[in-house]
Image (cartoon, rainbow, N blue to C red):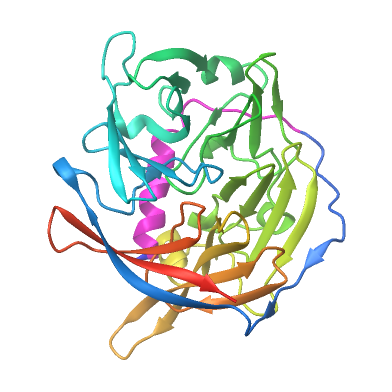
Amino acid sequence: MIGFEFWYRRCYLYLLASIIIYSCNDLPKLDDQTVIPILSSDLSWSVDTIKLALPDQTREFPYRTWSHNYANPQLFAGFDERLHQINILNTSTMEYEKTLSLERSGPHGIPNSWGIGSIYYQGKDSIFILQNTPNMVFLLNDDSEIYWRLDAAELLKDNYPHTQAAGLFDMFYIYFYKGKIYFPLWKNPEFRDFTEPLIGRYNKDTEEFTALNIHYPTTYQNNDFGEYDHPGITFFRDEIYIVFPALPKIYVYDLQGNHIRTVDMSAELPKAQPLEAGEDARTHAAENPGYLNVQPLANGKYFVQEARELFLAPDKKKRKKYTILYNSDFSEYQIIDRQATPFTFGDEYLYFPIPPDTTDVQLLERVSIQE
């Protein structure tokens, strides 16, 4: 139920909200490059079901926290918070290749699973971990040894008080590209200002930090959307795709923070209404449409996005999930009607997890796009 999911995520955000950043850059003047997708009949798909073995209590899909390295779709790295370990899956064979057990104490210790907000698997000796609390970035090798670290709290405290480098499951996460580390900036809710920057960049070689000129849209600055206040941020190659849950739009930027385009589905899909005075935030989230992160598919040939809407059943209100499938330039779209959350490794397949009946086998509905 979306109300519970957003409430759970909001509770998590409040846990990490005590360490945090900010800088007041001028708001960007967006250009007029807007893409309005049209419904296409050229996109179709086939579906089959595969089995994935779950050895040694390996976590089933979907993982809450996993590496969104879509440039390397051959490997999936997911964090199993129950066992405090990272599981490495070969997506070609769909077999787990390795498990990295994280230490909880000592010089290589990362003590709390709940404190880990994001991971990024660049390669076997370049594994980034963003820890929300205390706010640190670690770089590990294949033996789970920490050989580089960044104290994000110390980095941000003077110029960006009450803000932290933050990761939140699959909503926003750490990213590494050409020597630079990118991470979302999350302000302590007590000090929230929706005109502040959303993403920070740290140059690992020069030790320079920059807050990118990317902000919440005006409608968020002027209205309260309750539990829909956190964005979905996706990094793919040299671009950033941002979704604000209340809006059927996708904002695309380059890695310097320059606006490239806005994908606008407002003519086809409803937006959430602002929170009314006295309205319960969880109820508001459950009774309004919501839009989640964009994910690249087939190396950027397609993109997918989960959307959710409220519909009335005879007995009670229910949430309906569906997946929007876009072509590479977002000029066309199709709707995949699945009551499940999609995910992709970045290769040619789209997956919908099926809740397992046993502890040692995971079923995945696998979708292949055709034209």
Q: Is residue 68 rendered magenta in the image?
A: no
Q: Residue at x 36, y 77 (%)?
A: 318
Expressed as whole percent of the image width and height from the top left, the position of residue 40 reads 65, 82
Does 232 sit left or right of 350 as displayed? right
Q: Residue at x 66, y 46 (%)?
A: 240
Q: Quadrant of residue 327?
A: bottom right
Residue sitting nearer the eye, 145 or 118: 145
Q: Quadrant of residue 62?
A: bottom left
Whether residue 60 is visible, yes or no, is yes
Magenta stretch: helix, strand or loop mostly: helix
Whether residue 272 is visible, yes or no, is no
Expressed as whole percent of the image width and height from the top left, the position of residue 352 reads 37, 65
Q: Residue at x 45, y 45 (%)?
A: 74
Q: Residue at x 29, y 21 (%)?
A: 111
Does 272 sit left or right of 367 as displayed? right
Residue furthest front as drawn: 93
Residue sitting nearer the eye, 133 or 331: 331
Task: State which quarter of the image contains the N terminus.
Answer: bottom left
Q: Is residue 6 rendered magenta in the image?
A: yes
Expressed as whole percent of the image width and height from the top left, the position of residue 10 reads 42, 47
Residue 79 vertical position relative to residue 158 in the rendered view, above or below: below
Does 258 sit left or right of 134 as displayed? right
Residue 156 vertical position relative to residue 337 in the rendered view, above or below: above
Residue sitting nearer the eye, 280 or 140: 140
Residue 269 vertical position relative to residue 181 in the rendered view, above or below: below
Residue furthest top as drawn: 107
- Specify start and end residues of the magenta stretch as a single range: 2-24
